[in-house]
Image (spheres, grey):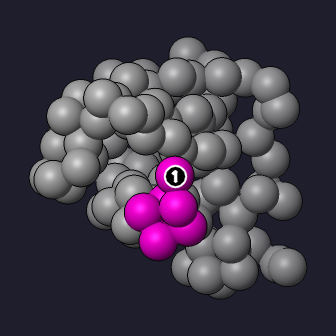
Amino acid sequence: MDQALEENLMGALENVIDPELGIDIVNLGLVYGVDLDDEGIATVTMTLTAMGCPLAGHIEQDVKRVMEDLPEVKDTEVDIVWNPPWSKDRMSRYAKIALGIPD
């Protein structure tokens, strides 16, 4: 997958907002990677801010919704992982400022 396509996929994922924090999942550092195979199956490897997040299903559905808007994507698989664990260090500067977290 070329860099322009990867940037396009990540850009789409910036439209998925964590309902509790009000910041997109990319800037929160929840997305660990995205891949698109030759059949158009996108795999989004991501985590959540906490195990047992009550909104996990909602976020997963939003990920699938934004990816299906891209012509290259035929289907999306969301792989939620817990290793490496998420921490505030993964957040972008934008997210830290928006949430009032010192850098």
From the viewer's perspective, is residue 79 above or below residue 74? above
Q: Nearer the viewer, residue 52 or 47?
A: 47
Please state if 50 lies on the left or on the right of 87 as rendered: left
Mark 1 residue element:
loop
From the viewer's perspective, is residue 54 above or below residue 19? above
Q: Percent position (x, y) of residue 42?
A: 38, 35
Please state if 54 lies on the left or on the right of 52 as rendered: left
Instruction: Identify the main secondary structure in magenta.
Output: helix
Q: Residue at x 43, y 26 (%)?
A: 78
The crowd level at tag 1 (other Cα within 10 Å; few <14, some 14-19, many 20+) is few
Is residue 58 visible in the rendered structure shown here?
A: no
Q: Nearer the viewer, residue 73 or 12?
A: 73
Q: Residue at x 65, y 55 (%)?
A: 29
5 magenta-colored: yes
Report the amino acid beneath label 1: Met
Furthest residue in direction front, as rendered: 38
Image quadrant where one finds the C terminus: bottom right
Please state if 18 lies on the left or on the right of 47 as rendered: left
Q: Which residues are magenta?
A: 1-7
Q: Percent position (x, y) of residue 56?
A: 42, 26
From the viewer's perspective, is residue 26 above or below residue 93? above
Q: Residue at x 15, y 53 (%)?
A: 71
Instruction: Give the residue number, with chain letter if any, for mark 1.
Output: 1
Q: Percent position (x, y) of residue 31?
A: 58, 47
Furthest residue in direction top, as rendered: 52
Q: Report which quarter residue 12 is drawn in.
A: bottom left
Q: Residue at x 61, y 81 (%)?
A: 94
Is residue 49 visible in the rendered structure shown here?
A: yes
Q: Report which quarter residue 40 is drawn in.
A: top left
